Image (cartoon, rainbow, N blue to C red):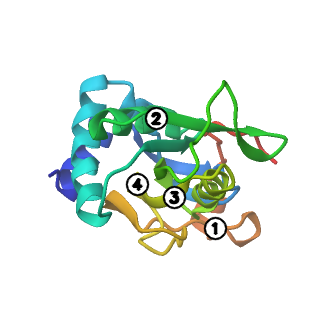
């Protein structure tokens, strides 16, 4: 299993651990940003990271899974690789009119045991939305996994969460920025547009 420092080195080596002033998909501001798309663009790196995460999931959540479900966009690649690691199909929810829904012919069989997989958990909002979607489709969200829990373990998503590693990276509302962050122009590197 990969150590905390080995995980961070994978992100550093991929140029995926950024420093500056960032607007997160939650709308919060942060001095650090983890660009999972860059770390997952190397299939061998994604395989290493997700193999280690699958070990953590198996230790945390007892029983088998029928499916992996992820929120698009950030969860698609990591969800696919986790499905491959666990030997189950992977599907993803897409945001339509502000709500995560299944499209593309995806469905969840009633009573299916589903692992929700994300790339990064910050506030846990998209994780909770995806879990609500799993349950609304008739599945049973029995656990969750992410590469990085950047909430410092504080995000409550309603099911056990296995994280490859945990970071405590402060995030701030736009009207509560510390002076050193306010002095730097903000950029939004994520997949969602500004609200």
Mark nearest the camera among 4 and 1 is: 4
- Secondary structure at numbered mark 4: strand
Separation of marks 1 and 3 at Cα, in angstroms: 30 Å
Dot 3 crowding, Cα within 10 Å, few <14, some 14–19, many 20+ = many
Residue identifier under label 4: 145
Question: Disc 2 vs disc 1: which is toward the camera?
Answer: 2
Query: Counting other residues with Cα less than 10 Å from the Cα at mark 1, is it few (<14), some (14-19), or many (20 or more)?
Result: some
Visible residue check, residue 127: yes
Q: Name the residue under label 1.
A: 172
Callout 1: SS: loop
What whole-number distance in Å separates the C-alpha atoms at marks 3 and 4? 11 Å
Residue 90 got which mark? 2
In the foreground, 72 or 83: 83
First of labels 3, 2 by sequence position? 2
- The answer to whether residue 15 shows anywhere in this view is no
**x and y, in percent, of residue 132 in the image:** 65, 58
Task: State which tag comes first along the sequence, 2 or 1.
Answer: 2
């Amino acid at each position: 299993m990969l150590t905390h420092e080995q995980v961070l080195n994978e992100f550093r080596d991929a140029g995926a651990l950024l420093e500056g002033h960032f607007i997160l998909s939650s709308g919060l501001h942060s001095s650090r940003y983890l660009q999972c798309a860059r770390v997952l663009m190397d299939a061998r790196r994604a395989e290493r990271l997700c193999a280690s995460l699958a070990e953590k999931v198996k230790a945390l959540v007892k029983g088998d899974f029928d499916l992996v479900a992820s929120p698009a966009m950030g969860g698609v690649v990591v969800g696919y690789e986790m499905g491959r690691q666990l030997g189950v199909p992977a599907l993803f929810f897409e945001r339509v009119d502000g709500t995560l829904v299944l499209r593309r012919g995806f469905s969840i069989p009633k009573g299916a045991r589903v692992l929700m997989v994300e790339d990064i958990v910050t506030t846990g909002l998209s994780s909770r939305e995806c879990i609500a979607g799993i349950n609304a489709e008739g599945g049973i969200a029995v656990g969750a996994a992410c590469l990085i829990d950047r909430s410092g373990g504080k995000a409550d998503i309603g099911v056990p969460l296995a994280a490859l590693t945990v970071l405590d990276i402060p995030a701030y509302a736009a009207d509560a920025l510390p002076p050193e962050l306010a002095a730097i122009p903000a950029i939004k590197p994520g997949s969602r547009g500004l609200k």
